[in-house]
Amino acid sequence: MPKDGETRDGVALTNLDQPLFDEAGATKRDLVDYLDAVHERIIPALRDRALSVIRIRPGQPAFMQKNLPKYTPDWVPRAAVWAEASHREVTYALGNDRRTLIWFANQRAVEYHAALGLVQTPTQPTHLILDLDPPEGDDTFGKAVQGALLVRQALADCGLDGAVKTSGSKGVHVFVPLDGKAGPEDVAAATRAVAARAERLDPKLATTAFIREDRHGKVFLDATRSGGATVVAVYSPRIRPGLPVSFPVAWADLDSVTPADFTIRTVPDLVAKTDPWADTMPAPQALPADLIAEGHTIPIARVQAMHEGKRRAKARREAEADGES
């Protein structure tokens, strides 16, 4: 166990006994120890992907860091990626080795969010991903599980298979590994189609409505994890009470677990001899042509939501003007 003034893999460790944040129930020492213990499991999910981390400093709100700071050691692997949204080049770290993870842990980087594509082909997702976001309420995770089972059925109906993990918060992520033959726009279209098919299986439970007020207490099937998006990596801790971890679960066990079962204290033993994510991940698959075609008929959620938001804002202004006249 490291102490202040010690080094681990050449990284000087500091302030190890400081709490990470209120309700973490853990210190920076615990974070360093956790990432070191699981580095062989998490690195395959991070390798050669632009890495964004969420850090939290004492007494400050958490913040996401994409561009590497100037004081980053030269030995941290990195890649320059063009960011279309900000029209600039961003230098991302690559979580390719143990030393880099230990350095990030010492920087109080708690969450690890990986790009969906490799740095060699940043816009090409390696997986089709559905992010299931449950509504507020008592049994939020239970509803997310029900939504995941709808997605699984929709995938099975078109000959696809996926792996599932907890998000580390209240939701669930479904990953379908791809053979790389479908382009980014086709992968995005297929993702929309899977979500739409899952919604049709049980429209009382699930919705693809991007605008929150239109979800009406249903599980949101988020099909926007494509292109330049990121997703929290498997085995990454989350900045939540008790430091839960995004963890893979066998489909048969999904309805018998809770996110709190997987924390930085419980996960090292669970992955000491096996990698559940690798064990449950099916082989890469081709996307069916009819799924892609259907998806191209479905509007892109963010664009549709932007136009709808403008329409509603205009309607409100007109209503207010009518009320004043």
Image (tube, helix red, strand yellow):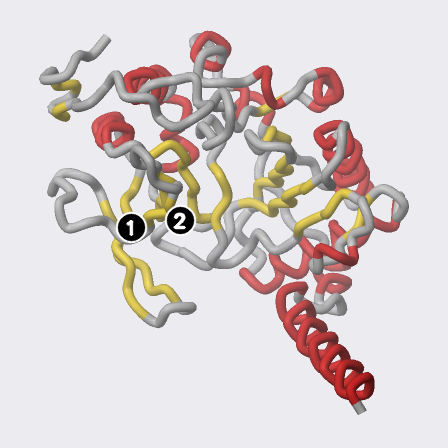
The residue type indicated by label 1 comes to Tyr
Q: Name which residue lies at 14% across and 16% down.
A: 4
Compute the Cα span from label 2 to label 1: 12 Å
Vertical arrangement, residue 288 with respect to residue 174, above or below: below
Front-most of residues 154 and 304 = 304
Vertical arrangement, residue 289 with respect to residue 58, above or below: below
On the picture, is 123 further left or further right than 60?
A: right
Q: Residues within 10 Å of mark 2 (few under 14, many from 20)?
A: some
Q: Quadrant of the C terminus?
A: bottom right
Residue 260 percent across, percent down from the top left: 59, 19
For disc 1, the marked residue is 92
Q: Name which residue lies at 38% across and 17% down.
A: 26
Front-most of residues 251 and 54 = 54
**The quadrant where residue 251 appears:** top right
The residue type indicated by label 2 comes to Leu
Residue 43 percent across, percent down from the top left: 36, 30
Residue 57 appears in view: yes
Instruction: Please count the marks in the image.
Output: 2
Vertical arrangement, residue 164 with respect to residue 120, above or below: above
Residue 118 is tagged as 2
The disc, 2 or 1, on the residue closer to the chain's N-terminal end is 1
Residue 28 is tagged as none
